[in-house]
Image (cartoon, helix red, strand yellow):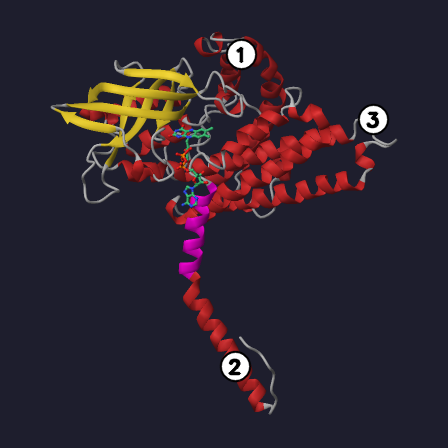
C-alpha cells in the first residue's frame, strides 16, 4: 500500500492528484534513498572537529536526486507564496510525515528547519534586495541560515525579555549581546543569521521594541563560542550555537520589514513552522512503531518461551500506539486545513493543539519501542534513543508547552464561558419548570 492510499478519509477531499503522486514519490525517496544513506552520512561526518568543518558529500547526491524528481521546496504553501512547489499546507503535511522518518530527508528536499521558517520570513517580509541576496540561494539549497532569538541571560519563552541591543549609527546598525540555541549555526554553509534584538528598548509598547535584522555569519565582531549538546548528541553538522555579538555592524537596510516590527515577524514565522515540526514528528512516531513491530517479532529474542508479540501487554502497546498516532495525525492535518482555508492567525488554536499534543504522543510511542528493545533501545544501535532526544526538545523549542497551554486555556475560557453558563442556567430552570409542572421534586445542590 503506497502512502497516497493511506491518506486519512477526512483529509482525502482536500488532496490533489498531483500531490498524491508526489506523496508516493516522497515515500519512496525517503525509504529507498535517505534512510539507507544515513550510515554513510555518519561515516562521512567523521569524528572530532571534522564534524563541524566539512559537509558529508552524500547529502549533495541526495539533493540532486530529489531535484531531478521535483521533490524540492514543498513547504511553501501555494495560497501564500509563489516560490514553492505549489502544494497546500495539508498536502505538504502528508509529505512531511515521511520526511520525518529520516534525518536526511528534509534537507535533501530543501524543506529543513530553520531554513524553512527563515525563507518564509524573507519571502513574506523581505525587501527585493534581501530576497535577491538571501532568499534566492536558500531556495536553491546553496546556503543555510539560523534564527537567533533565544538568549542565555533571560527567560526567552517571553520574547519581550530579549536584550541584544541594536543601535543605529548613521546608516549602520550596531549589534551587541549574546544568543544561544542558534540551531544550524554549526553548519559550515550557514551564511546568514536572522537576529532578533531591541532597537527601541524604551518604547512604551513592549511589542514595538524589537527588530529582526539580517546579519552575514562572517561579519566581524561575531564569535561562535561553542555548540550545545542535546541529551549528549552534538547534532553535527547542524549544531546549536552559543554566539556573541560585539559591535557587529551591518547596513540599516538589513532590518526586515522595518524597525520595531520584530514581534510581528516572529509571530508570523512561528505559525506554519510549528506544524512542520508536528508533521515530521508523526513520521518519527511511525518509525518507532515500525521498530517496535520488528523487535516484538524477532524470533531470536524470546522471553519465557514466547516472542514478545505473544505477550498481551506488548500487543496493547502496539494497539495504543496505533490509536494515538492516528489521532495525533488528524489534529495536525486539521490544523493544516485550517491554515489553508485562512491563515496561520485564524488557526492559532489548532496549531497550538498540534504543537502540544504531537510531541507528547510521539514520546510515549517512542518510549514503548525503547522498552521493547530492552538495553538495546537506549544505545546507538537503534534510532530510538536519538529520536526520543530530538522529539523531547520540541516540548521546549518554539515555545514551551506551558505557554501554548496557557494561551489555549485562556482562549477556550474566554470564547465559551458566557454561552456555557447561560445554557446551563437555562437547562436548570427548564428542569425545575418540568418538575413543577408534574408536581414532583428532586434534591440537587447545583
Ligand atoms: C533543540 C533546540 C533548538 C532550539 N533552536 C532555537 C533556534 O534555532 N533559535 C532560537 O532562538 N531558539 C532556539 N531554541 C530555544 C527555544 O526556543 C527556547 O528554549 C524556548 O523558547 C524557551 O526559552 P528558555 O529556554 O529561555 O526557557 P525559559 O523562558 O526560561 O522557560 C523555562 C520554563 O519555564 C516554564 N514556563 C515558561 N513560561 C511559562 C508559563 N507562561 N506558564 C508556566 N510555565 C512557564 C516552562 O516549563 C519553560 O520550559 C531551541 C531550543 C532547543 C532545545
Could you tell me what secondary structure mostly forms the magenta stretch?
Answer: helix
Q: Is residue 309 left or right of residue 118?
A: right
Q: Residue at x 45, y 37 (%)?
A: 274
Q: Which residue is mark 2?
A: 430
Q: Nearer the viewer, residue 161 or 259?
A: 161
Compute the Cα span from label 2 to label 3: 64 Å
Quick check: is 166 in the magenta stretch?
A: no
N-term mark: 2 or 1: 1
At which x and y percent is residue 329? Answer: 57, 42
> Image point 86% across, 32% down: which residue?
304
Residue 281 picture location, percent across and down = 55, 34
Q: Position of residue 45 (x, y in %)?
A: 52, 10
Image quadrant in which you'd find residue 200: top left
Judging from the image, what secondary structure is the residue with disc 1 in?
A: helix
- Mark 2 vs mark 1, CA separation in Å: 71 Å
Helix, strand or loop at label 2? It is: helix
Please report the residue visible at 49 percent of the width from the left and 37 percent of the height from the top. Answer: 395
Residue at numbered disc 1 = 58
Label at residue 299: 3
Amino acid at each position: 500500500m503506497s502512502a497516497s492510499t493511506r491518506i486519512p478519509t477526512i483529509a482525502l477531499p482536500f488532496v490533489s492528484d498531483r500531490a498524491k503522486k508526489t506523496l508516493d514519490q516522497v515515500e519512496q525517496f525517503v525509504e529507498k534513498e535517505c534512510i539507507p544513506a544515513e550510515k554513510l552520512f555518519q561515516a562521512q561526518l567523521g569524528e572530532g572537529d571534522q564534524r563541524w568543518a566539512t559537509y558529508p558529500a552524500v547529502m549533495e547526491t541526495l539533493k540532486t536526486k530529489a531535484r531531478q524528481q521535483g521533490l524540492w521546496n514543498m513547504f511553501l504553501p501555494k495560497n501564500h507564496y509563489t516560490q514553492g512547489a505549489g502544494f497546500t499546507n495539508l498536502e505538504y503535511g502528508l509529505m512531511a510525515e515521511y520526511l520525518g522518518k529520516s534525518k536526511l530527508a528534509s534537507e535533501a528536499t530543501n524543506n529543513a528547519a530553520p531554513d524553512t521558517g527563515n525563507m518564509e520570513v524573507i519571502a513574506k517580509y523581505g525587501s527585493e534586495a534581501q530576497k535577491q541576496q538571501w532568499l534566492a540561494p536558500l531556495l536553491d539549497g546553496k546556503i543555510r541560515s539560523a534564527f537567533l532569538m533565544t538568549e542565555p541571560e533571560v527567560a526567552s519563552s517571553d520574547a519581550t525579555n530579549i536584550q541584544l541591543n541594536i543601535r543605529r549609527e548613521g546608516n549602520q546598525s550596531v549589534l551587541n549581546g549574546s544568543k544561544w540555541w542558534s540551531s544550524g549555526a554549526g553548519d559550515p554553509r550557514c551564511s546568514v543569521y536572522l537576529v532578533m534584538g531591541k532597537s527601541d528598548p524604551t518604547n512604551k509598547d513592549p511589542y514595538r521594541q524589537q527588530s529582526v535584522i539580517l546579519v552575514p555569519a562572517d561579519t566581524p565582531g561575531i564569535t561562535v563560542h561553542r555548540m550545545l549538546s542535546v541529551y549528549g548528541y552534538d547534532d553535527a553538522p547542524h549544531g546549536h550555537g552559543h554566539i556573541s555579538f560585539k559591535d557587529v555592524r551591518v547596513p540599516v537596510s538589513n532590518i526586515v520589514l522595518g524597525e520595531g516590527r520584530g514581534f510581528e515577524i516572529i509571530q508570523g514565522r512561528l505559525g506554519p513552522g510549528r506544524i512542520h515540526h508536528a508533521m515530521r514528528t508523526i513520521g518519527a512516531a511511525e518509525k518507532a512503531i515500525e521498530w517496535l513491530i520488528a523487535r516484538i517479532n524477532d524470533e531470536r529474542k524470546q522471553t519465557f518461551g514466547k516472542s514478545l508479540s505473544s505477550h498481551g501487554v506488548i500487543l496493547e502497546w502496539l494497539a495504543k500506539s496505533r490509536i494515538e498516532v492516528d489521532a495525533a495525525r488528524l489534529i495536525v492535518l486539521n490544523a493544516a486545513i485550517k491554515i489553508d482555508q485562512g491563515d496561520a492567525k485564524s488557526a492559532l488554536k489548532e496549531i497550538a493543539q498540534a504543537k502540544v499534543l504531537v510531541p507528547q504522543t510521539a514520546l510515549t510511542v517512542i518510549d514503548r519501542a525503547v522498552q521493547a528493545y530492552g538495553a538495546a533501545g537506549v544505545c546507538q544501535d537503534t534510532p530510538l534513543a536519538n529520536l526520543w532526544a530530538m522529539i523531547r526538545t520540541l516540548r521546549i523549542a518554539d515555545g514551551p508547552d506551558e505557554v501554548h497551554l496557557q494561551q489555549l486555556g485562556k482562549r477556550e475560557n474566554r470564547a465559551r464561558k458566557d454561552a456555557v453558563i447561560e445554557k446551563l442556567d437555562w437547562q436548570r430552570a427548564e428542569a425545575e419548570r418540568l418538575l413543577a409542572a408534574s408536581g414532583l421534586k428532586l434534591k440537587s445542590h447545583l
